[in-house]
Amino acid sequence: MMDEFTVQRIARDLEEKMNSSEVAIEIAAESKYQQGKIAEEELDYYSAAELYEGAIKLAPDEKLYVESLKKLTEKMESRDGGVSEVRISSVPVDDNLNSDTDDK
């Protein structure tokens, strides 16, 4: 059984982790990504693209977010006959996807 001091220390440690801005950013990014997945499943591609872009802005190194946006953009372009109205200029999708191969 844990003594009161140990329980308080554990609670304090957990509180510090929960207050961490890094954790908050990760949670916000994942939330935007999950909302984007839902929008994509509902065929609301434009909202999905905006949400994926928001996730990438918060967590630019998260390959899953970048890959999801790239696949969605390709899907939109094929649906629109090769031309997509969505221009995601603030997120360098191809640069993020190729960053791990550039190091080789």
Image: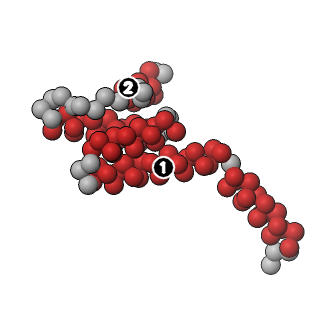
Question: Helix or strand or loop: what does disc 2 sit on?
Answer: loop
Amino acid carrying label 2: it is Ser
Query: Which residue appears at 82% of the width and 67% of the height?
Result: 8
Q: Residue 89 carries which label?
A: 2
Question: Helix or strand or loop: what does disc 1 sit on?
Answer: helix
Query: Which residue appears at 74% of the width and 54% of the height?
Result: 16
Whether residue 39 is situated above or below residue 104 in the rendered picture: below
Query: Which residue appears at 40% of the width and 44% of the height?
Result: 51
Residue 88 percent location from the top left of the image: 35, 30
- Residue bearing mark 1: 30
Residue 63 percent location from the top left of the image: 43, 38
Of the numbered discs 2 and 1, the one sitting upstream in the chain is: 1
Query: Which residue appears at 62% of the width and 49% of the height?
Result: 23
Whether residue 95 is situated above or below residue 5 in the rendered picture: above
Q: Quadrant of residue 98?
A: top left
Res. 50 visible in picture: yes
Residue 52 percent location from the top left of the image: 39, 42
